[in-house]
Image (tube, rainbow, N blue to C red):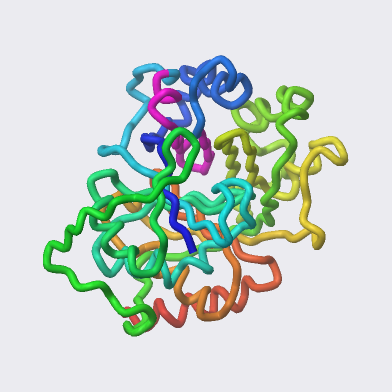
């Protein structure tokens, strides 16, 4: 297995709902006019609380300074697990549960905070740039480490940093207690993509979904009070588009535009956090992904500025809640 350290230097930011109009011009340019920017890594996720932006340094220049824009400290790097060679975005999806014990858990054991972005194509593990030496030390025995330079993967030199830590033995620690409240909205979600060549034909619709519709019209009057939440994620990373939206929103798109899996799978969400989680706490992703990995349940995982979100197959939601509640109770 290879672990690719991508060449993008990333910023993680939050845009307040009431300030989205100020940033819309730059966001539309990043999402729909990538040839007009040098941005190669852009992700926007809307939650009930705010918009979370993950963007490289070139893309960040498109966002205006504003009191409504909050930027997390530090520069972040994206890691990607690739099996059988190939580049990050053309490989088959790994799923966060497939890397829970080989990547997520060891980083948590070394007190390295991660920020996750699962897409239709793959899973990106974001770590602070300053933590990279310890990340490499922690994972070097399990992976071939490669740095992506000008689009080419080359051997990454381990710095030999240890800071007195011993590499953890995989799978030998006790269950990790879940310490944050969990909730499961009533929406069902689709994880999908579309051909970039068809993006112009649905650009107006996507702009309405992203910035203007507010989610009320397409949910038939259902509100967050009835268990529905507003959640939409758009990523354009190295030319590949990923979309996460609820089932009702997908019905607004023309037939045969969105990619679907052979099973037409729908996903249910587990939201993690009662109060904003912050960026310094370690192990949140591991608390969720390890029990799912043990139960062999696939999952997408999307971290946002304030909360985390896991998506699991609809038919597994009850067993997922049961597995996570078990771990939650052991931590009381």
Is 43 magenta? The answer is yes
Q: Residue at x 38, y 37 (%)?
A: 12
Which residue is outermost to the right? 255
Q: Residue at x 60, y 42 (%)?
A: 232
Where is 210 relative to 263, above or below?
A: above
Is 289 magenta? The answer is no
**Residue 190 located left or right of residue 179:** right
| Total numbered badges shown on the rendered structure | 0
Closer to us: 92 or 45: 92
Residue 123 point in image, percent of width and height: 52, 53
Corner quadrant of residue 130: top left
Which residue is outermost to the front? 155
Closer to us: 275 or 158: 158
**Residue 131 located left or right of residue 330:** left
Q: Considering the whole magenta stretch, tell me its main secondary structure.
A: strand
**Residue 184 located left or right of residue 202:** left
Q: Residue at x 53, y 60 (%)?
A: 310
Residue 112 point in image, percent of width and height: 27, 58
Q: Residue at x 64, y 59 (%)?
A: 186
Residue 317 point in image, percent of width and height: 62, 71
Work out which quarter of the rendered image holds the C terminus and state it: bottom left
**Residue 58 located left or right of residue 292:** left
Corner quadrant of residue 61: top left
Residue 274 point in image, percent of width and height: 39, 57
Where is 72 relative to 105, above or below?
A: above
Closer to us: 192 or 271: 192
Where is 131 relative to 295, above or below?
A: above
Where is 67 relative to 76, above or below?
A: above
Segment colored magenta: 42-61
């Amino acid at each position: 297995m290879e672990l690719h350290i991508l060449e993008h230097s990333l910023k993680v930011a939050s845009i307040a709902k009431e300030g989205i109009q100020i940033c819309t011009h730059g966001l539309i340019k990043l999402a729909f006019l990538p040839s007009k920017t040098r941005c190669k890594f852009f992700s926007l996720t809307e939650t009930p609380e705010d918009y979370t932006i993950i963007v490289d340094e070139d893309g960040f220049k498109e966002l205006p300074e504003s009191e409504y824009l909050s930027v997390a400290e530090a520069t972040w790097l994206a890691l990607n697990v690739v099996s059988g060679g190939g580049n990050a975005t053309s490989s088959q999806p790994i799923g966060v549960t497939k890397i829970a014990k080989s990547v997520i858990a060891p980083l948590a054991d070394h007190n390295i905070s991660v920020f996750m972005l699962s897409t239709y194509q793959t899973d990106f593990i974001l770590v602070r740039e300053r933590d990279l030496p310890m990340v490499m030390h922690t994972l070097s025995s399990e992976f071939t480490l490669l740095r992506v330079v000008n689009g080419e993967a080359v051997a990454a030199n381990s710095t030999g940093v240890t800071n007195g830590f011993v590499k953890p033995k995989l799978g030998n620690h006790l269950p990790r207690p879940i310490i944050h409240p969990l909730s499961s909205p009533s929406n069902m979600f689709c994880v999908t993509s579309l051909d970039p060549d068809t993006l112009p034909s649905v650009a107006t619709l996507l702009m309405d979904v992203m910035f203007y519709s507010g989610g009320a019209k397409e949910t038939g009057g259902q509100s967050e009070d009835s268990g529905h939440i507003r959640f939409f994620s758009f990523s354009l990373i190295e030319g590949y588009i990923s979309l996460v939206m609820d089932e009702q929103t997908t019905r607004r798109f023309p037939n045969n535009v969105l990619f679907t899996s052979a099973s037409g799978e729908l996903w249910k969400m587990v939201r993690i956090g009662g109060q904003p989680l912050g960026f310094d706490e370690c192990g949140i992703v591991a608390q969720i992904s390890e029990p799912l990995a043990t139960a062999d349940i696939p999952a997408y995982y999307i971290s946002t500025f304030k909360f985390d979100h896991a998506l699991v197959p609809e038919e597994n939601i009850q067993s997922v809640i049961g597995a996570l509640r078990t771990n939650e109770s052991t931590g009381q």
